[in-house]
Image (cartoon, grey):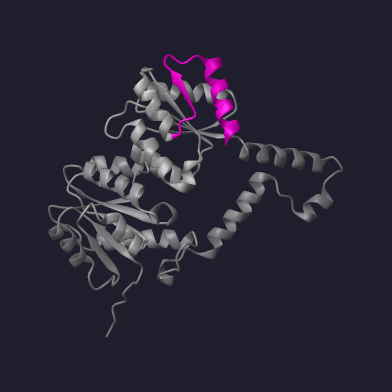
Amino acid sequence: MKIRQTFHSPILILSDTMRDTGQVRDVLDGEFDNISLSSDPENMAAEFDARPADVLILAFDTLEKSERNYLSLYRQSAKLPLHPHRTIILSSKDNVAASYQACRKKLFDDYVLFWPMYYDRHRLAMSIHLALSHLADRGVITQPDSTWQKPDEIFKELCVSIKRAIGTPDIQELQNQPMGGGLAVAERKITFDSVKTLPIVMIVDDDEFMCKLLGDILEEAGYQILVAHGASEVLSTIRKQLPDLIIMDILMPGVNGIEIAQHLKAVPRWALIPLIIVTGNSDHNIVNECLKIGVVDFIIKPVERTGFLNKVRSALQRN
C-alpha cells in the first residue's frame, strides 16, 4: 500500500471570507499539513509575522482585492519584505486573462483557475510544489522532496556558460594562447565589471510614453533602467532587484505615487533609496507632503533633459 506523503512548508491562505479560505484548505488537506488561514485584512500582517509562510495563496474574488491586500500586507508586515516567498492568486474564468497578465508583469508568481469551481483539484497543489521547489533552488528553504530537485548537470552547465560569458579563462587555454591573448580576456572582464556597476534607476509611471521618454534619456546617459507601472509592479520588481534611485509620478490610478513612497519609506531596507517625484503640479501642499515623506527632489513636467540628468546625478550622490 502506497503511503501519501505530506509536506510541512508553511502556507498562508488569504481571503476576506472564512468560507473561501476553508474551501481552499479542504482542497489541499492531506497533502500539506502546515496551512494557516486569514480572513481578516486588518490582522493579516500580524498573522503572517506570527507564522511566516513560504507560499501565500490569495483567494480573493477579484484581482483588485488581491493586489490591494498584498500591498497592504507588504506595508504592514515587519517580516514579509525580508522573507523569501511565492505568491499564487486564485482566478475566476472571467478574470483569468487579467491574472495571466499580472503574473507576466511579475506582480504575482503564479495563478490557478479556481472559481467558481475547481476544474482540476490537483492544479493548485502542483503550483505550490513548483513554488516550494523554486525557493529550494534558491537555497532559502530545505528541499521539500527530492523528486522536485533539478539535476545538478543543469547548474554545472550554467556555471560553465557564465564563465564563458564573462571571459573567465581556463589555465590550459591561457598556456596555449599567444602573449597578447590575455589582454582580450582582461578587456572582456573589465567591460563585464563596468556593466555590473552601472547605477540602476527605477521609473514608476502608468504613462508608457513618459516611461519611454525618461528611459531613453537615462539609457543614453549610461544608466540601467527598471520600469514599473503601479504599486504592485514596484513591489514585485524591487523584491528581485534593488534600484539606486526611484523616479516616480504622483498621479496614477489606484495607489498614487505618494502612497507608494510612504510604503517604501516604511520598509527599512528600502527607506534609504532616494526618491524623485515627477509631477505636473507644483502645489505647495503636495510639495510639503512629499518632503515630509523624504523625497529628495522634484521634476516638473515637461521634462528638460539637462536639468533632469543633473537632478538624477545629485540624487545618486546622496545614496
Residue 205: x, y in percent? 38, 28
Residue 76, compared with residue 136, is above or below; it is above
Residue 170: x, y in percent? 75, 54
Would you identify the image quadrant in which residue 133 lies?
A: bottom left
Residue 218, compared with residue 193, is above or below; it is above
Residue 264 is left or right of residue 87, and the answer is right
Q: Give me the residue at 42% from left, 58% from top.
A: 134
Q: Quadrant of the N terminus?
A: bottom left
Q: Give me the residue at 20% from left, 42% from top.
A: 95
Residue reaching furthest to the bottom? 1
- 230 or 256, nearer to the observer: 256
- Can the viewer see residue 284 in this picture? yes
- 14 or 94, nearer to the observer: 14
Residue 101: x, y in percent? 30, 40
Q: Give me the residue at 27% from left, 67% from top.
A: 35
Residue 219 is left or right of residue 72, and the answer is right
Q: Give me the residue at 35% from left, 60% from top.
A: 49
Q: Which residues are magenta?
A: 294-319
Asked whether residue 295 is drawn in magenta, I would say yes
Residue reaching furthest to the right? 179
Residue 239, compared with residue 49, is above or below; it is above
Asked whether residue 80 is drawn in magenta, I would say no
- Can the viewer see residue 127 in this picture? no
- 144 or 279, nearer to the observer: 279
